[in-house]
Image (tube, rainbow, N blue to C red):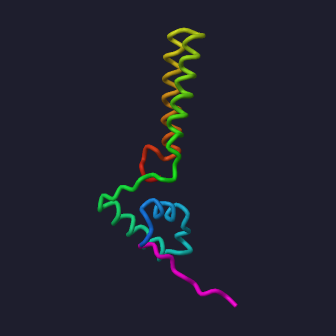
Amino acid sequence: MSLPYVQPDFESYSLNQLYDVREHLDAAAHPERAVVVERLIAEKEASGVREPIADRPFWLPVVLAVLSLAVVVGVGLSKGPKAALFAALITFVCLGADLAFFGYLDGHR
């Protein structure tokens, strides 16, 4: 006995959930779903709906910033101000990359 096929109710999905569906949907196998998901994303983006990022830990940017500061201070104390400036630059770039990767900068990853 097979279970009946149930079409997902994409209308009830949040914008973040729709982004996730678009990222993982096999559009070649399910072109009708891809069209629906793209339409819903466009509608929600056009309406200006911004959803909170609830699935990301709030403490992660704080921990990354504290660790970054510790690296800069440690290098500054041991190698001097020029090395500290270089460490600050590299740390700032890495912190930005980390925050972008975890989706804190785009607001809808």
In the rendered image, residue 14, in percent from the top left (x then y), is placed at: 43, 64
Q: Residue furthest left?
A: 47
Q: Residue at x 45, y 68 (%)?
A: 13
Residue 45 on image: x %, y %: 34, 60
Q: In the rendered view, tell whether residue 74 sits above or below residue 50.
A: above
* Residue at 53% in and 28% down: 66
Q: Which residues are magenta?
A: 1-11
> Is residue 44 within the magenta segment?
no
| Main secondary structure of the magenta stretch | loop
Farthest residue, direction right: 1
Residue drawn where x is 35% and y is 63% of the image: 44
How many circles with numbers are drawn on the protein? 0
Q: Point out residue 29 in the picture as x, y percentages from the top left corner.
A: 56, 74
Of residues 72 and 19, the one drawn nearer to the viewer in this rendering: 72
Q: Is residue 105 above or below residue 1?
A: above
Residue under the point 54% across and 17% down: 73
Q: Is residue 95 above or below residue 8?
A: above
Residue 9 lies in magenta, yes or no? yes
User: Which residue reaches farthest top?
Assistant: 80
Residue 59 percent location from the top left of the image: 52, 40
Report which quarter residue 2 is drawn in. Answer: bottom right
